[in-house]
Amino acid sequence: MHIDLNVPIPQLQGQSFASLSKKAKGKQPQTQNTDVIYSPAQITALEARVDALQHLGYTVIAFNQVVQKKIDPKTHINALDPLLARLRKRQEIAYVKRLTIVLDEDSEKGFGLTTGNASLVAPYDIIALVPTTATSFSLACLTHTQPSNLTAHIISLPLTLPRLPFNLKHTLVRSVLKNGAVFEITYVGALGGEADSSLGVAGTESGSSAKRNWWAAAREVVRVTKGKGIIVSSGSVAQTDLRAPKDIGNLITFLGLAQNLAHEASSKTPQKLVLRAQTRKTYRAILSEPKLVIPEDIAQSDPTAEEAPVPDNPPSPSSAHPTVQKSNPKKRTLDETPNDKDARNKKKKRSKGAGGGEGDS
């Protein structure tokens, strides 16, 4: 099983994501068109990318919706449900919904991952964070990766910047790995391809300089994490930039990653992440509702086991487990015969006579 957890969606039409200006913050926001509209050309291009991923051997893909700064209940719109409704159903591939929040200086006061916005986050299967400042990276690692119904599963780093805007401290990295989250490396930067423009990270370069920055930053990520807790995704909007899982595994081995870890970066590690993401809907992201599963062989061999009547007055513990009484040697047992009784009495008389003789002497 090979998984790609970063497939960008087309830009929306008929919707404005522009934030309110400082002068208009105190005023009533204007009514916006909340209809999610995709053109036929966008649907066709996305279908072609999905067909290419399926041809390359991917069985699970995640469509990525990007939100800037934080989740705002006044402007947030779920763009993935209308998109998935228009895509063609495929039996060999599964779709996953992902929400990515790009964090900047304004996000340091809050990402919008609060209990009040839980209903907005519930439709998404995976939550990812893209920190661009040292403070937002620290908050994302220490606070928002802890198990809860609003936990973040992926920490995606802007690898095409001239340099990372923060240091990858070992304490923060260990906290992320301990909480079960992972770090994401998008290989589109290594190819110099077209990345998702909706990320809107300031200072992102393209071309040969972007590839040089990507290799330097990706090596640093592998060095700090020691190859653990890393997933590799495409993050590409062009069909020509997609690569097969084995090609990606060979590519990231040049980062100093072992061959087995490079293979797991697109198979086992994202598979565990998807399973962990399902626990967001359970109690504290740990427990789920238990279910009794009876094996088929037992049900077929003993069909009356399920139909056995339950008594109205079940036996008490004392009757179910009777106590064992010690036998009294003075009482006659059921197996004792009269001859055995006479022999036992004679033996007692001889022992008394012997004791009395010793006393007289």
Image (spheres, grey):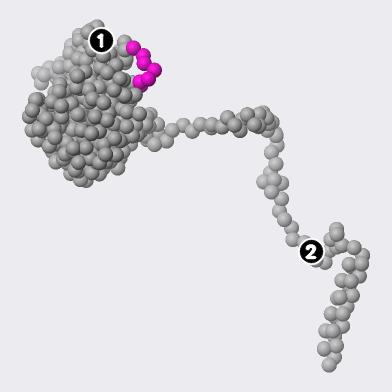
Secondary structure, mark 1, is helix
Mark drawn on residue 328 = 2
Q: Is residue 119 visible?
A: no
Mark drawn on residue 304 = none
Q: Quadrant of the N terminus?
A: top left
Task: Report which quarter residue 280 is drawn in.
Answer: top left
Q: Residue at x 11, y 30 (%)?
A: 211
Q: Position of residue 308 (x, y in %)?
A: 68, 31
Sequence-wise first label, 1 or 2: 1
Q: Nearer the viewer, residue 200 or 90?
A: 90
Judging by the rendered image, the residue that carries numbered circle 1 is 44
Question: What is the number of callouts on the image?
Answer: 2
Image height of 24 relative to 104, above or below: above
Viewed as shown, does residue 359 lie left or right of 126?
right
Q: Is residue 251 visible?
A: yes
Residue 183 highlighted magenta (yes or no): no
Image height of 153 relative to 333, above or below: above
Span colored in magenta: 88-94
Task: Report which quarter residue 251 is drawn in.
Answer: top left
